[in-house]
Amino acid sequence: MKSLRPELSSTDPTADPPPAVRLGRGLDLSALAELFVLTLRQHARGRRLLILAALFTLPAGLAVVARLANPSLTPAHLELPLVFTLLPHALVPLAALLYASGMIQDEVEEQTLTYLLIRPLPRWALYGTKLLATWLLTALLTGFFTAMTYVAISWGNAERGGTVLAARVAWTVLILALGLVSYCGLFGCLSLLTRRSFVAGIAYIGLFEGLFANIDFVVRRVTIMYYLRVLDVRWLEMNPARWSLDLAKAPEARSCVLLLLGVGAVTTVLAALIFRTREFRLKTPEGS
């Protein structure tokens, strides 16, 4: 915390120095780190994690059942419906929606936001720290269960073992993590615009990421899913015809990455500005 002490006008060495004058609400990195860890703990001990863990286990479970029922299935047969459809279309945006939309609303409903706002930290830093912790947890959750799904799909397949499998998992997790940057930023902002953010988020996922993303028209370029699919094709060599993608017209991988990060940045800045000026009905520490 920055401070300014005016020079003493008295030459008396026994005189007490004047009190420090604080220059605004600076950034206390230790307080931000404490808030970051606290947010991770809040997310990790909630029912959301148990529900999402059960849902994220579904692709791996389906892979095991499918391979037992039909041993001739190859990883390529299972990868598209489980890794590149079920995960990015449903589970990943749902995880972002549940956590990002609740990170501030939960504090308001539980009357604990007071204890955050009385900290000597600017509001935008509070919001940004909680969002960063939310993204990290959803990315770790996605990464763990994506790896589990790939193991269930590729177990015993000589062509998908060792470093080949590890590289494919790493690239897939990276793509999904980039998508989470956009999703978390978007749903976090949405939670400050409407109290029915979960309903609005479900509608967005179904309409934009479910319907519009599968229409071979210019409208799909406003969906996050479109850019994730382009990255799947360019980095993982997926067949573009499966999603009616024309690589000659599709953006380059670098442009997709910048756009996904840009969506996350713009929505985060907008949400931080809203959070900075929003008046919340708070309960004081004394309960008044």
Image (cartoon, rainbow, N blue to C red):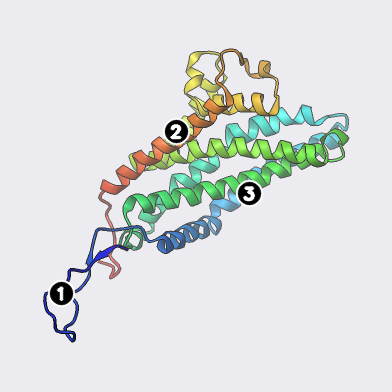
Q: Is residue 19 left or right of residue 224?
A: left
The mark nearer the N terminus, 3 or 2, is 3
Q: How far is mark 1 from mark 3, CA to CA?
A: 62 Å
Residue that badge 3 annotates:
53
The mark nearer the N terminus, 2 or 1, is 1
Residue 85: image location, x then y, percent: 64, 29
Residue 264: image location, x then y, percent: 45, 37
Residue 47: image location, x then y, percent: 55, 54
Residue that badge 1 annotates:
8
Residue at point 60% right, 35% down? 175
Res 254 quadrant in image: top right
Res 165 quadrant in image: top right
Residue at the far front: name it: 11
Label 1 is placed on what type of residue?
A: Leu
Q: Are there few (<14), some (14-19), or many (20+) residues within 10 Å of tag 3?
A: some
Is residue 145 among what the camera can see?
Answer: yes
Q: Is residue 255 left or right of residue 82?
A: left
Task: Tell me whether circle 3 and circle 2 mark residues in contact (CB < 8 Å).
Answer: no
Residue that badge 2 annotates:
263
The mark nearer the N terminus, 1 or 3, is 1
Can you say which quadrant of the picture contains the N terminus?
bottom left
- Residue mark closest to the camera, 3 vs 2: 2
Residue 202: image location, x then y, percent: 48, 34
Is residue 52 positioned above or below 160 on the image? below
